[in-house]
Each structure stands twice: as C-alpha cells, then as structure tokens.
Amino acid sequence: MTLLESAKAQRIEGADGVIAAEIEVGGAIKRIEGSHLLVAAGRKPNIEDLGLEDAGIVYDKRGVTTDAQLRTSNRRVYALGDVASREQFTHAAGLHGSLFVRNALFKLSPSRADGAPIPRVIYTEPEYAAVGFSEAEARQRWGDNVRVLFAPMHDNDRAQSERDTEGFARIIVRTNGEILGAVIVGAHAGESIATVALAIANKLKIAAFTSSFVPAYPTRAEILKRAAGQFYTDSLFSPRTRLLVRLLAQLP
C-alpha cells in the first residue's frame, strides 16, 4: 500500500479492465493505473431548498446547527441524524430519535446528544473500532494523568484458533481507573467495542473488566480483560506486594 498525502485528483479516465488517475503531488503530475477506483468524496446535507432562513434556522455546510438537546436556533424545531451537524452514523441517528421523543414529547429531564459515547467503526480488514477519547485527546486534556493499557490480538486464543491474529486492544484510562476511551483492531472489532461503550456510558471504572466481567472462552472479547489487567500489573508485582505475600505465606 502506498499513501500519497496532500494529493489532488486532476483527471480520471479509463477503458475496459483499466482505470487511470492523474494526480498532482507536490506540484508534479503523477499517473496511477489500476483495475478499480474507489471514490470517497464524503457527503453534504441537502438543505438548500428547505427555506430554513425563513424559519430562522441556522445552518452551515455540515448541516443544521443544533444544541445538546438537538434543538435548532428555532426552539420549536429539532434536527436529527446526519443533518444535525454531529456524528454521521446510523446508530447515532437512532440515538437522536430516542432523545427527541424524550426531550420534545414527554418533556422529561433533558437528555444530551453528547452524553453517550458513540462508537466509530471502519469495516476494513482488519476491522477498526474506537469509542471515547483517543490517547492524544486524553493526554491533551489530562496530561500525565493518563495510562494506556495494551494487549495484542496475537495473545487471544480465539484469534489463534481462527488463524487471524492481526490487531490489538488499547484502553485509555485515567490513573484513578476512569475509562476514557478504547481502540480495538482486529476481526469483529466493532462487536467488541460495544462492551467498552457500555462501560463508559455507565461510568464504570477499569476494575469492572478485571473483577465482575467474565467473557466466554474462547472469544475475542477476552482481550479487553487482558488489557485491563495491565492496570494492576505494577502494584501486583511491586516490592511491597511481594513482601506482603511472603508474610502471608508464613501464617499458619
């Protein structure tokens, strides 16, 4: 795989069985040929002809501007899903629907669209899944009060049995055990990240993955328990703990 950063497509052409792209890289034109071309140009909201200005609704190129309760600048109008200038995921849109029912119809205590951790999954091979803060974001906010717990997929028995050991799990926590985020790379990573999303949403600490969390064996979800165990490695093998174990061993 070759990555060409800051490249700009100038021309696309092709014939049966071949397609070519002329791209500009660093001021020079480079021609690349291949069998297929994937165009990932993104999306933009289709809101130009809705008369939003007449309704006093503010928007920009990302979509309709909303607050934490998904209300627009017109307090009687809500915006949900991709058009709400937030995460453009189907599961996020589903969350927006339930928040709207609670906030607009039942008038319960306001629920915030930014109050739930939204998983992010890229369905590649290996699969990439993340939730919460990245390591860089966490360190920018909490500095040295951040730890990163890591476990390679190679150590997971399910991955070994399936002969697909590429990947890892990384859990970002504060030094008090608060879970800030996680990244999982590997087969079905999007399935395993749901467990971390649930833990963050319910404000569970990393101890929940080492005490009451019992994943079935063999499953890839076990990698989360293995990574979480690293939070206690230093204390378990510290000189103080070793001394305590020796003293306990002398008791009758």
Image (spheres, rainbow, N blue to C red):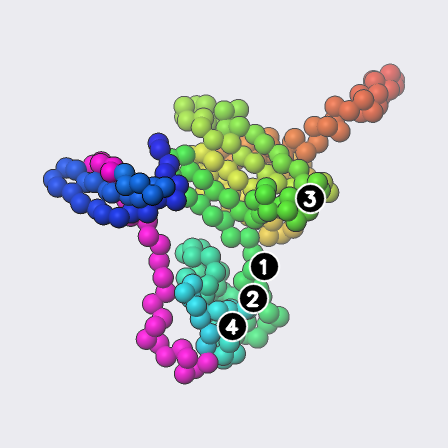
Q: Position of residue 75 (x, y in %)?
A: 52, 78
Residue sitting nearer the eye, 226 or 150: 150
Magenta stretch bounds: 31-56
Mark 3 or 1, nearer chain start: 1
Say what amino acid the circle numbered 3 marks. Answer: Gly
Mark 2 or 1, nearer chain start: 2
Q: Position of residue 40 (x, y in %)?
A: 32, 49
Residue sitting nearer the eye, 238 or 216: 238
Say what amino acid the circle numbered 1 marks. Answer: Gly
**Where, quadrant-wise, is the C terminus in this rendering?**
top right
Residue receiving disc 3: 143
Overall secondary structure of the magenta stretch? loop
Q: What's the residue at 39%, 44% (across, down)? A: 6
- Mark 2 in CB contact with mark 1 (< 8 angstroms): yes
Q: Nearer the viewer, mark 3 or mark 1?
A: 3
Residue receiving disc 2: 68
In the rendered image of this protein, does residue 56 appear above or below residue 134? below
Outermost residue toward the bottom in this view = 54
Count of marks, rendered view: 4
Residue receiving disc 1: 115
141 horizontally vs 151: left or right: right
Residue receiving disc 4: 71
